[in-house]
C-alpha cells in the first residue's frame, strides 16, 4: 500500500452512521472494503483502520513486553474502546456512541487520510486543528523530516 490521500467532509445520519466516500473506498484493497476498526486517536479524534492495517498494528503491539508498566498502560489505552465495524449494504458504518462522545463528533465530520488510516474529526475541531500557524510548517518539516533517509532520492 502506498498510503491513503484525501480529505472528505461528510455528514452522519441521525443514528451515527457514516457513508464512506467513494474516493476513500477506491483507495482500499478489495479485502479492506468491508471491515474496519475504529479507536481513540491521540488528538481528540478517532482513527479508522482497514482491518488488515489494524492486524499489522496489533502484531507490533504483541511484540511489546507487557510486563513493563508503561507498555501495558499504552496497550490498554490504545485499545480502549476499539471497535470492529462492518460496512452495511448501503456503504455505511455505525460509529459507537462512546467514541463519538470522546471525539466530540456530532453531525458534520472530516474524514482525513493519515498514511495507513483515516482520522475522523468533528469538522469544527478539525478546522481549529488545521488553522495552526502555517508559517511554522517549514520549521516543523525540517525538524521532523531531517533524519528520514532517501526523502529526496529518485527511487
Image: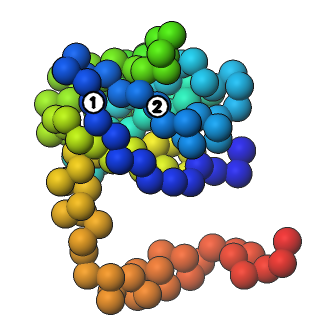
Q: Earlier in the sequence, mark 2 or mark 1?
A: 1
Nearer to the camera, 81 or 34? 34
Q: Which residue is situated farthest in the top direction here? A: 89
Q: Is residue 7 visible?
A: yes
Q: Residue at x 29, y 66 (%)?
A: 130
Q: Residue at x 31, y 22 (%)?
A: 17
Residue 71 occupies which quadrant of the picture?
Answer: top left
Element at badge 1? loop
The answer to whether mark 2 and mark 1 are in CB contact below 8 A is no
Residue 46 occupies which quadrant of the picture?
Answer: top left
Question: Mark 2 — residue?
Answer: 20
Residue 37 occupies which quadrant of the picture?
Answer: top left
Determine whether 61 is above or below 13 in the image. below
Q: Residue at x 22, y 17 (%)?
A: 15
Alpha-carbon span between mark 2 and mark 1 = 10 Å
**Marker disc for residue 92:** none
Determine whether 55 is above or below 110 in the image. above
Nearer to the camera, 45 or 127? 127
Question: Mark 1 — residue?
Answer: 12
Is residue 15 found left or right of 59 in the rendered image?
A: left
Across and down, in percent, residue 59 comes to 59, 29
Q: Is residue 61 visible?
A: no
**Coloured how?**
rainbow
Across and down, in percent, residue 154 comes to 84, 78
How packed mark 1 is, by other alpha carbons closer than 10 Å (few <14, some 14-19, many 20 or more), is some
Across and down, in percent, residue 109 comes to 28, 43
Is residue 150 found left or right of 146 in the rendered image?
A: right
Q: Residue at x 64, y 38 (%)?
A: 26
Image quadrant for the C terminus?
bottom right
Amino acid at each position: 500500500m502506498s498510503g491513503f490521500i484525501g480529505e472528505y467532509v461528510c455528514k452522519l445520519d441521525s443514528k451515527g452512521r457514516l457513508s464512506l466516500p467513494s474516493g476513500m473506498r477506491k483507495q482500499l484493497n478489495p479485502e479492506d472494503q468491508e471491515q474496519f476498526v475504529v479507536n481513540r486517536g491521540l488528538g481528540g479524534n478517532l482513527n479508522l483502520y482497514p482491518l488488515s492495517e489494524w492486524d499489522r498494528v496489533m502484531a507490533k503491539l504483541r511484540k511489546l513486553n507487557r510486563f513493563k508498566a508503561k507498555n501495558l498502560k499504552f496497550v490498554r489505552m490504545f485499545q480502549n474502546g476499539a471497535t470492529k465495524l462492518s460496512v452495511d449494504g448501503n456503504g455505511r458504518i455505525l460509529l459507537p456512541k462512546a467514541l463519538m462522545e470522546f471525539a466530540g463528533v456530532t453531525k458534520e465530520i472530516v474524514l482525513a487520510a493519515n498514511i495507513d488510516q483515516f482520522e475522523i474529526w468533528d469538522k469544527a475541531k478539525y478546522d481549529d486543528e488545521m488553522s495552526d500557524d502555517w508559517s511554522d510548517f517549514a520549521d516543523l518539516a525540517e525538524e521532523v523530516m531531517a533524519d528520514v533517509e532517501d526523502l529526496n532520492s529518485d527511487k
